[in-house]
């Protein structure tokens, strides 16, 4: 009986230590996740019936980089482009650095909307969904601004 009691006490101690170890590691892994938000989103009113551009800033306040893998919209097909050596190139994935930003701006990294189902007009909004490799999707309402709109702050 004494032996059974000692064995039970030993197993209980091991289980308690294991429980403490696992809860401590999950708390620290939560601190390392990407924490994403979006600001400054807009689309200049398209001058074309079939194409448009979109701009925004994705901020990551977390300790782990996030990887933007795609963007979708009911408006049409959306691709990500970056400017490299003055040439526009389609990007399959873009990083949002830990404690950093991914900026989509005119003349740089931007969204291209193609095969538009309709031409959005100034004052309307376009909904887009940003898809990430290891984070939940983020839905963004992108206001349509004048074709010559330039943001005063941000990008």
Image: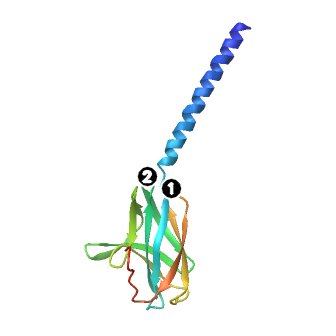
| Quarter placement of the C terminus | bottom left
For residue 129, which quarter of the picture?
bottom right
Element type where label 2 sits in the image: loop
141 lies left or right of 110: right
CA gap, disc 1 to disc 2? 10 Å
Colour scheme in use:
rainbow
Element type where label 1 sits in the image: loop
140 lies left or right of 6: left
Q: Is residue 130 above or below residue 78?
A: above
Residue 96 in the image, given as x and y percentages of width and height: 41, 61
Residue closest to the eye, 61 or 4 = 61
55 lies left or right of 11: left
Q: Is residue 88 above or below residue 38?
A: below
Residue located farthest toward the left when viewing the structure as drawn: 85
Number of numbered discs on residues: 2
Q: Residues within 10 Å of mark 2 (few under 14, many from 20)?
A: some
Q: Residue at (54%, 80%) from the top-left corner?
A: 126
Q: Are marks 1 and 2 in contact (CB under 8 Å)?
A: yes
Residue located farthest toward the top when viewing the structure as drawn: 2
Which residue corresponds to mark 2? 64
In the rendered structure, which disc, 1 or 2, sits on the residue that comes first in sequence? 2
Residue 95 in the image, given as x and y percentages of width and height: 40, 61
Q: Residue at (49%, 61%) from the top-left corner?
A: 36
Which residue corresponds to mark 1? 134
Q: Residue at (57%, 32%) from the top-left corner?
A: 20
Q: Is residue 125 above or below residue 49?
A: above
For residue 153, which quarter of the picture?
bottom left
Residue closest to the eye, 73 or 2 = 2
């Amino acid at each position: 009986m004494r032996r059974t009691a000692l064995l039970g006490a030993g197993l209980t101690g091991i289980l308690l230590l294991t429980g403490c170890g696992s809860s401590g590691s999950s708390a620290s892994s939560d601190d390392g996740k990407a924490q994403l938000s979006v600001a400054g989103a807009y689309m200049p009113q398209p001058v074309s019936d079939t194409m448009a551009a979109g701009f925004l800033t994705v901020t990551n306040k977390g300790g782990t980089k996030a990887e933007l893998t795609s963007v979708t919209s009911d408006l049409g097909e959306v691709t990500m482009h970056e400017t490299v050596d003055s040439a526009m190139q389609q990007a399959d994935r873009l990083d949002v650095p830990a404690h950093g930003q991914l900026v989509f701006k005119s003349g740089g990294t931007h969204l291209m909307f193609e095969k538009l189902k309709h031409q959005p007009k100034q004052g309307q909004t376009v909904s887009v969904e940003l898809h990430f490799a290891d984070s939940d999707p983020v839905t963004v309402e992108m206001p349509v601004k004048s074709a010559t709109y330039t943001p005063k702050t941000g990008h």
